[in-house]
Amino acid sequence: MVNLISFSTKAEYDEKKDSLHVPNISYIAETESIEAIQQELESTPLTFIFYGTGSLSFSGTGTNSIELSVDNGDSWHELTGTINIGYLDSIMFSGDCTPVSGEGIGQFVVEGTFQAMGNITSLLDGNEMSSGDTYAFMNIFKNCTGLTRANKLVLPSEILSEYCFAGMFEGCSNLTVVPELLTETPSEGCYNRMFYGCSKLSYIKCLTVGSTPTGYTEDWVYGVAETGLFIKEYNRYDWNVGDSGLPTGWEVKDYMPHKPMTLKVLANGNVKFAGTTSSCKLNYSTDDGRNWNELPNNTDVQVTSGQSIMFSGECSPNINGIGRFYSSSSDYEVEGNVMSLLFGDGFKENYSLSGKDYVFVNLFSGCTGLTSSENLVLPATTLSIRCYYFIFKACSRMRMPPKVLPALETAQECYRDMFNDCSGLTETPNVLATTMAVSACTGMYKRCVNLVKTYDLHSTTLSEGCYGNTYGECRSLVKAPELPATTLANICYQGMFTGCTSLTTAPSVLPATTLVSNCYEAMFQGCTSLTTAPSLPATTLAQRCYLNMFNGCTSLTTAPSLPATTLDNKCYYGMFSGCTNLNSITCLATNISASYCTYYWVSGVAQTGTFTKDPSMTSWTTGNNGIPTNWTVEDAT
């Protein structure tokens, strides 16, 4: 079992974890599988984590009682009376309760601020809810004004009994986040008054579909926040607005992973889809999926502003993908789940592109009318060779990309040139991958000249060429992402930020101590605004490892310290060439006999400066291939 407590950064976690006195506390990075986290929560008994002192009791209905554990489940004791709570106490709960009709199993009475998490069915007989457990959790947290977070609380979603969650959080006036309601078909009264009086609640996700049971949301959102966001199923058409439906004044959006891929038309014009083979046919719907028609292949279809067009199909790719969308004068956004083009009605359950090499090659390439793909879902967690290659290439007016690329392991060239020449793109998706395949991100954002925001990269396992020219010529990028990998691969970062003329902040450190061939070649070449180089702690070099790394960095004044004592062939070749303001270098090499190891490495640096060397080193020459002419030479201390 893990205790989930939010920290802004890993550094904050490292600093505070030992002082929290919470058993088995763990840090979960953004890269950790959502499925793994969910499985962990499902196997964790209902748990409260307290953020202040207070008290706790449980008033069971009938003969119901529960047990608690304060030592991570090692020992259990019946909860009787009222117990006192300390700061950051973590308390688990278990029981064999049977619901009483009209009353549920009981109610917690809590003083103090706390978070509820884990699986609430740990309180029930058999640790699961059956259709016969009517009123199961009715009013269980009613008037717990100290409850602030319940988003990590696991509610049963397969079978809901009647009135099972009625009044569950009623009067929880400080509750800000709640569990997702994922059951497609609810039961009578199951959500009645569930969030009644939750005045700080401003986000609800409810994915019910199909027919509406009698009164299952009666007064469920009475008194919630005046504004907020409600996420619903795209094909749920019959929600009313008000206390028993969608909260008045809230924004309503479709749940994109469950929505077929959709074009939202912003301006009149034409679109067409050209399938790569006769089997690559799509159906389309203009009425939110109620009716579907076959889309004529490679034929212009007239569209009008305000129209939404859904697409579905069972396409199989060849080396040119499944096909390509074209637009003529029409502006549009794309949203929904791209898997609807491959798996028809079964797209929601599919997360794998295995065996579908090249599948989305050029899908929107050159679509200058595409303005945003922010709500397009690319859900695949298993990728294939070149699966997204050129998918958005030269979509020059697209400002926002898909929000996240969730796969933890990549495939060969899977993201290669994905956004190449998207000159309007202002930020990148959050790439969660920790393992990089060969050339996985080569040229991914090349020439995205307006890109200003990117996320830190999580990859610790690299492959040859994986980040080659990834941000090449992104002329508006000011801050580079951090690069945590300590084990490198040949040409892994070659040209990664070449030509990023606005880049001022490089990664703070490139932590690898043993380098490989061409790993940092031309990495920051032409970054004319770069003032501070990353720390370079490597002591074991390789051929061409730093070749032209900072070539043309005209704002750089101080070189990173170079601690390696033995150089390799062409390792520093052209490293600082053209750094016209560079006036300080510390290089502790004592063996510079390797071929061309310092060839032209200081050509064009400042006319005067300070060169710090190892005291025992006597074989340095003066000039472009050694110590810069007219510089002061000092021995390192």
Image: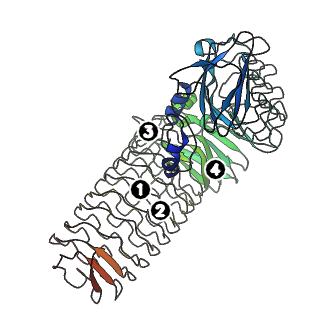
Answer yes or no: do the residues labelled 2 and 4 have beta carbons within 8 Å?
A: no
Q: Which residue is mark 1?
A: 483
Numbered badge on residue 602: none
Residue type, label 4:
Glu
Q: Earlier in the sequence, mark 3 or mark 2?
A: 3
- Disc 3 from disc 1: Cα separation: 34 Å
- Disc 4 from disc 3: Cα separation: 24 Å
Residue type, label 3:
Pro
Q: Position of residue 513 (x, y in %)?
A: 29, 58
Q: Element at badge 2?
A: loop
Q: Element at badge 3?
A: loop
Q: Earlier in the sequence, mark 1 or mark 4?
A: 4
Answer yes or no: do the residues labelled 3 and 1 have beta carbons within 8 Å?
A: no
Numbered badge on residue 480: 2
Numbered badge on residue 317: 3
Mark 1 residue crowding within 10 angstroms, few (<14) / some (14–19) / many (20+): some
Q: Element at badge 4?
A: strand
Numbered badge on residue 333: 4
Can residue 577 be spotted in the picture? no
Residue at point 65%, 28% (across, down):
182
Which quadrant of the view contains residue 506?
A: bottom left
Which quadrant of the view contains residue 348?
A: top right
Indicate which label's residue lies in the foreground, 4 or 3: 4
Q: Earlier in the sequence, mark 4 or mark 3?
A: 3
Between 109 and 475, the one nearer to me in the picture: 109
Q: Element at badge 1?
A: loop
